[in-house]
Amino acid sequence: MNKKITILGIESSCDETAASIIQEESGKIRILSNIVSSQFDIHKEYGGVVPELAARAHIEKIDLIANKAISESKINLNEIDAIAATAGPGLIVCLTVGLNFSKTIAASLNKPFIAVNHLEGHALSPKLNTNLKFPYLLLLISGGHTQYLLVERLGKYKRLGTTIDDALGEAFDKTAKIIGIEFPGGPKIEQYAAKGNRDKFQLPKPILKRGGCNLSFAGLKTAILRIKSSINTEQDKFDLAASFQKTIEEILFEKTKKAFEIYINEQNTLKKTFVVAGGVAANKGIKDKLMNLSVENGFECLFPEINLCSDNAAMIALVGLEKYKKKLFDTLEFKVNPRWQLDENAKFLKGSGVKI
Ligand code: KG4
Ligand code: ZN
């Protein structure tokens, strides 16, 4: 018998309040609803996310968003098999809202509760639109994280490389801010870049030829700050954005080549799959560059659908679904874990004096 499995996912780790219902039947996963409410307008005037304001907005919205996800999915509440919620990493005050809300629903429906690592949501997200199978090499590029990981199976990750300073999304956002693009500027860099000269400014590529597939982006911010003082016209801004975009593409190209080598040495399998996920995976220039590199190196390259790159609850429901099938349930005592890592054994690699 092929039972349908229906999961409600809830996400509130940062500045998106999100709820989604997904359903698996005969091995096929369908997204029945996927509601995301972003808080851009709330944080815009501060130039970044203010945790207390974000938490308050989650509290105000979460009920509405979850109800919308349920009504759009056209399922009955009693069809839900489990409730999955992000428990970390993220902002503690924000995580708490979604987690407590989800526990309350799980208790009132008397259904299993599943705590999800937000990064695992990104890691598995291409499974929502492709036939993704373990193991694979993952490049996770989001606002808070930048890592190469060997994904062995559900819950089993080995970090191969990480940023030693800023996350890539953070580098995009900081660059946008310096150029004068309104928050959240990261996604707009590409639009500016499209009108600029990619060779106008020379920017550094820190630790490009050393440190394995570890990465560093802080030096770029410093260089951009310096160049900013000589910028006068709108065209200069386009040129700076284009030069930044080009530099990032080149860094990821080199570091991914290195990560391919490390992955092949680590993994005794002929299966070569490369997944790129997280908010920055929506960047078309990066996607094209890494797709080409993958073809050259015999890797199948998978990205999530563009609307599933940034934070959403469908990816949280997806991890919930995979855990549900393995009966990996959590108790209602489960606490938020703002620093929850995918590879708990990985060394902390940030700050001066770090050896890479
Ligand atoms: O995964 P995500 O939605 O949230 C986190 O878990 O951090 O990633 C958000 C990050 C932001 O830093 C945003 O600027 C960046 O992803 N981002 C982009 C693009 N779209 C989103 N960066 C570069 N190009 C884009 N098209
Ligand atoms: Zn995220």
Image (cartoon, grey):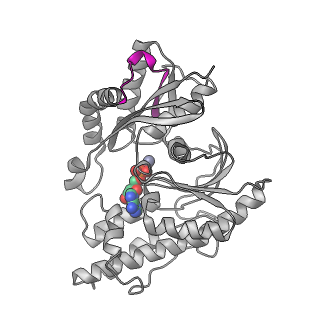
278 versus 338 height, above or below: below
Q: Residue at x 36, y 69 (%)?
A: 190
Residue 323 is one of the magenta-drawn residues: no
Apparent side of residue 44 relative to residue 264 in the rendered image (left or right): left
State the residue at coordinates (27%, 40%).
Answer: 52
Q: Picture coordinates of residue 87 (x, y %)?
A: 47, 34
Q: Is residue 339 left or right of residue 268?
A: left
Task: Confirm whether residue 212 shows in the render.
Answer: no
Membership of 86 in magenta stretch: yes
Where, by quadrant of the figure, is residue 187 drawn? Answer: bottom left
Taking the image in four quarters, ligand 1 sits in the one at bottom left
Q: How many labels sit on residues?
A: 0
Q: Residue 257's spot in the image, x, y percent?
A: 65, 69
Q: Position of residue 174 (x, y in %)?
A: 35, 65
What residue is shown at x 58% (from left), y 74% (from top)? 208
Please give left or right for residue 250 compared with residue 76 in the image. right
**Front residue of this view, candidates 67 and 96:** 67
Q: Is residue 73 visible?
A: yes
Q: Quadrant of the N terminus?
A: top right
Q: Which quadrant would residue 234 be assigned to in this image? A: bottom left
Q: Is residue 10 above or below residue 182?
A: above
Question: Residue 294: horizontal and vertical position, in percent?
Answer: 62, 66
- The boundaries of the magenta stretch are 73-87
- Residue at the right extreme of this rendering: 268
Residue 60 lies in quadrant: top left
Q: Quadrant of the C terminus?
A: bottom right
